[in-house]
Image: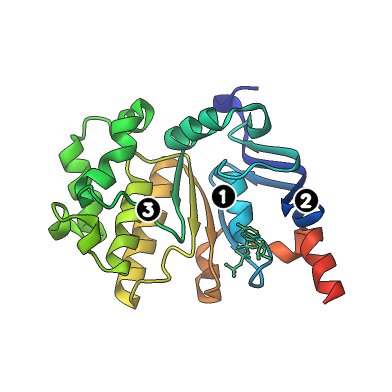
């Protein structure tokens, strides 16, 4: 099956993951997320949310079982191929923002469209400059475009990471507590942009947060501890 033909954005089948042999952090029999769904993923601290996002982004590899994203089986791909797939199809905002400190805000935001023709194509007739201005002004960081990352506050860096994730409208957006460093106004601005961008691109959104007030915004709620047998066993043994 090719990625383009896949009906599901995400399909997990009998997935297990351990950082240390014999100590499963994740054990999920099945999880399917359809294209276009917006998923609020929550669960107690330590239940494996960030780990699951790492598997979905292809940063971590399952110990066993199958992780398919847009129909592609990550187990069958080299780590280089997973990196290329991620740049092409995924936008992600992790707790560690992974911004490049010696590049300007503008250059950090432009990275995905500089590196990936497919992300570039999705801009249509819009120039690089216009695309950066557009996303930066919506996130209230346009005045920092020529500043180095190192001079920005944590909340500003979080917005740069969000801009980089959304530019070029990726098909799957993965966000790990993306609003944790934002004040209320900026949080609302960011969520508005996030949902507008996903809707425009028909993108699938997988969003981890402890903030349950955000739940009504999403089409589906997934409580990780309910589908993760490893967390259930740890809970039962605690
Ligand atoms: N790099 C790592 N090496 C070893 N163990 C790890 C590593 N990262 C996470 N863990 C362990 O895996 C388990 C799941 O961690 P994870 O960060 O995925 O949980 P989480 O649900 O995202 O937690 P939180 O809500 O606190 O961010 C925890 O027991 C954690 O200690």
Q: In which quarter of the image is residue 226?
A: bottom right
The reply to whether the C-beta atoms of the residues labelled 3 and 2 are less than 8 Å apart is no
For label 3, the SS is helix
For label 2, the SS is loop
Residue 161 location in percent, x, y?
A: 35, 54
Circle on res. 37:
1
Residue 210 location in percent, x, y?
A: 55, 72
The reply to whether the C-beta atoms of the residues labelled 3 and 1 are less than 8 Å apart is no
At x 36%, y 33%, the residue is 119
At x 66%, y 27%, the residue is 76
Q: Which of marks 3 and 2 is nearer the N terminus?
A: 2
**Residue 144 appears in the rendering:** yes
- Circle 3 or circle 2, nearest the eye: 2
At x 66%, y 72%, the residue is 44
For the residues marked 3 and 1, what is the alpha-carbon distance in whole angstroms? 13 Å
- Which residue is under mark 3? 196
Circle on res. 233:
none
Front-most of residues 80 and 160: 80
In terms of image quarters, where does ligand 1 lie?
bottom right
Q: Earlier in the sequence, mark 1 or mark 2?
A: 2
- Which residue is under mark 2? 21
At x 38%, y 71%, the residue is 181
Q: Is residue 45 above or below residue 19?
A: below
Q: Quadrant of residue 222?
A: bottom right
Report whether 92 appears left or right of 226.
Answer: left
Q: In which quarter of the image is residue 225?
A: bottom right
Front-most of residues 219 and 171: 171
Q: Earlier in the sequence, mark 3 or mark 1?
A: 1
| Some atom of ligand 1 lies within 8 Å of the CB belonging to the residue at label 2 | no
Residue 64 location in percent, x, y?
A: 77, 40
């Amino acid at each position: 099956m090719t990625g383009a033909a896949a009906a599901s954005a995400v399909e997990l089948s009998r997935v297990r993951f351990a950082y240390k042999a014999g100590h499963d952090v994740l054990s999920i029999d099945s999880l399917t997320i359809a294209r276009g769904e917006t998923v609020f993923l929550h669960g107690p601290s330590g239940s494996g949310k960030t780990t699951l996002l790492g598997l979905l982004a292809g940063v971590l590899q399952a110990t066993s079982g199958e992780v398919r994203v847009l129909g592609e089986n990550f187990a069958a791909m080299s780590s280089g191929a997973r990196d290329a797939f991620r740049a092409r199809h995924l936008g992600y905002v992790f707790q560690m923002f992974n911004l490049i400190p010696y590049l300007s805000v503008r250059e950090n935001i432009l990275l995905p469209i500089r590196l990936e023709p497919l992300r570039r194509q999705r801009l249509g007739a819009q120039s690089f400059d216009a695309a950066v201005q557009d996303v930066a002004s919506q996130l209230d960081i346009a005045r920092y475009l020529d500043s180095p990352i190192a001079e920005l506050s944590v909340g500003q860096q979080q917005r740069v990471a969000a801009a980089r994730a959304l530019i070029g409208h990726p098909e799957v957006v993965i966000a790990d507590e993306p609003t944790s460093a934002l004040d209320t106004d900026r949080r609302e601005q960011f969520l508005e942009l996030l949902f507008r961008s996903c809707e425009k691109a028909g993108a699938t959104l997988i969003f981890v947060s402890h903030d349950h007030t955000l739940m009504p915004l999403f089409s589906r709620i997934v409580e990780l501890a309910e589908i993760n047998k490893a967390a259930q066993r740890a809970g039962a043994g605690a």
